[in-house]
Amino acid sequence: MPRAALVTGSTSGIGLGIATALAGAGYDVMLNGFGTEAEIAALVSSLSSHGVRVSHHPADMSDPAQVAALVEATVSAFGRLDVLVNNAGIQHVARTEDFPAERWDAVISINLSAAFHATKAALPHMQRRGWGRIINIASTHGRVGSEGKCAYVAAKHGLIGLTKVVALENANAGITANAICPGWVETALVQRQVAARALEGGISEAEAAERLVGEKQPMKRFTRPSSVGALAVFLCSDAAETITGSEQVIDGGWTAQ
């Protein structure tokens, strides 16, 4: 029976890149995230073309009960859960003294607490089989700070801490836990930022992209979602069986400075 993976926040961006890579590597995949019925159907069809089973669950990641239900739905659909990728996340930007309390709560809930609830629900299934991979999509902001992002930075630092504890607790259970820390990734959301900068500055989108990335990264190019996906697939492989509790940086040199 193929191994099964659950990827939260996987109907677009980094999450979709990871889900696509896992499907291509032969994993059954449970998608989670937003989209119209037609959009979800198209994604399921596309990933199913790899010869694996694909399903979708619309769990609200801010609701612990729905997060637990998502894990159980994955086990029900595929008969097992081997890989959990905690990817769902949101962002809000404001100085700390101006940061709305309700936005702080929302960012912490979806970016950090949801990963805890999903991990708590998934671990017993992995422990019974003696094998599992937990991959938390953190960020360079799990390692460094940026102005205006107090909630996001706090959540991502916390996610790396959670990763380390889960890794230690399961070090001899056949289960690894690792964090992937991307820098700038080429997603639709980022492309909209690039287009807006180009329009505002009267420059080409290529120049706008280089300037945006260059504000943080020595390497002035975006990471592709597929590259993050390839790294996730590697962390699920036998070659990575002793990699646990780590921060896998894929950030164009951002945090090397």
Image (cartoon, grey):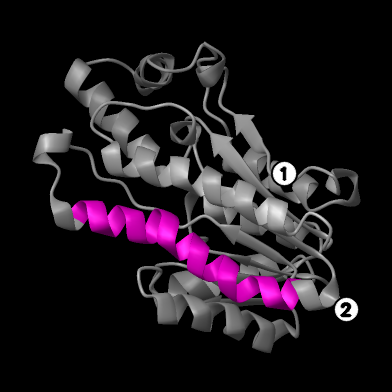
Q: Which residue was labeled with disc 2?
A: 1
What secondary structure is marked by label 1?
helix
Q: Nearer the viewer, residue 4 or 142?
A: 142
Q: For mark 2, give the secondary structure.
A: loop
**In front here: 58 or 123?**
123
**Residue 178, image x, y percentages:** 67, 47
Q: Which mark is residue 199?
A: none
Amino acid at dot 1: Ala
- Magenta segment range? 103-126
Magenta span: predominant SS is helix
Mark 2 residue type: Met
- Please tell me whether residue 210 belongs to the stretch shown in magenta: no
Measure the alpha-carbon separation of dots 2 and 1: 22 Å
- Which residue occupies 75% across, 80% down? 80
Disc 1 marks which residue? 230
**Which residue is farthest left?**
98
Residue 199 x/y as whole percent: 22, 25
Please report the residue visible at 74 percent of the width from the left and 59 percent of the height from the top. Answer: 170
Identify whether 34 is placed above or below 104: below
Does the image show residue 214? yes
Closer to the N terminus: mark 2 or mark 1? 2
Is residue 53 visible to the viewer in this orientation of the structure? no
Residue 158: where, in percent of width, then height? 46, 46
* Quadrant (top left/top right/bottom left/bottom right) for the N terminus: bottom right
